[in-house]
Amino acid sequence: MSQTPKFWTIDQEFEAELEEKKSRFLAFVMPYDAFETRLEDLRAEHRKANHHVTAFRWIHDDDRVEEGAKDDGEPAGTSGMPMLKVLIGRELINIGVIVVRYFGGTKLGAGGLARAYSGAASRALDAAKLVPFQRILTRSVSCRFDKISELERQISLQPLSVKERIFNETGVEIVVEGATEELETLSAFVADMDHRP
């Protein structure tokens, strides 16, 4: 029985739009790796926009979660933080959200701003295809020459990528990259294979 993922993420960008009292809120959610570059692109693309509000969550290798939010000129706490709370509430990780605002002439007030920014972020996330977060690791497995084709076949059956093959006098060491669960399956296969004649 597979367990429910602790976190969710996305592997491509999604966007949505919300209008509130003639202000336009353009929301973009993207994988964290693309976050900084995408912010620069959106600032250039939407030069006339009044604000480029951001929020992000990122998980380090030691499972420490780093998160942040910037209001970009909106009153403190009315925009970036409500978007970050959406990310936290949906248990999302390794993701960035940027909302570009074109001011429509009517002030929304603190509550109105918080609802508009969190609402725009939520719309983009509703459009997103979420995938379970899996930590990608590298592991090396080895076998004798007579077992290479068996090991290669097993690797090809799993969503793993081969990073390197190192041949030595007794066989081969293959460095593979993949999700923890897949690597454990492969290690179990290798252990079992080593005990067979």
Image (tube, rainbow, N blue to C red):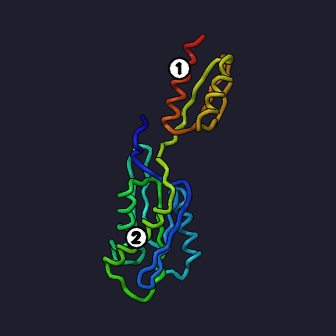
What x and y, as percent, mark residue 121? 44, 67
Local secondary structure at mark 1: helix
Contact? badges 2 and 1 (CB < 8 Å)? no
Classed neighbour count for the residue bearing mark 2: other residues with Cα under 10 Å, few (<14), some (14–19), many (≥20): some
Q: Residue furthest front?
A: 1
Asked if one can make out residue 51 in the rendered structure from this viewpoint, the answer is no
Identify which amino acid the numbered label 1 is placed on.
Ala
What x and y, as percent, mark residue 188? 51, 24
Q: Residue furthest bottom?
A: 105
Asked if one can make out residue 80 in the rendered structure from this viewpoint, the answer is yes
Query: Relative to 38, is 121 on the left or the right?
Result: left
Query: Relative to 192, is 144 on the left or the right?
Result: right
**Disc 2 or disc 1, which is closer to the eye?**
2
Classed neighbour count for the residue bearing mark 1: other residues with Cα under 10 Å, few (<14), some (14–19), many (≥20): few
- Toward the viewer: 96 or 4? 4
48 shown above or below 95:
below
132 shown above or below 107:
above
Q: Residue furthest left?
A: 111
User: Which residue is depicted at the point 56% across and 22% down?
Assistant: 190
Q: Which residue is mark 1?
A: 191
User: Which residue is depicted at the point 36% across and 77% down?
Assistant: 113
Local secondary structure at mark 2: helix
What x and y, as percent, mark residue 137? 52, 38
Q: CA distance from mark 2 to mark 1?
A: 51 Å
Q: Which residue is mark 2?
A: 119
> Residue 101's mark?
none
User: Which residue is depicted at the point 68% across and 18% down?
Assistant: 145
What x and y, as percent, mark residue 1? 42, 34
- Toward the viewer: 174 or 190? 190
41 shown above or below 186:
below
Q: State which quadrant residue 89 falls in.
A: bottom left
Identify which amino acid the numbered label 2 is placed on.
Gly
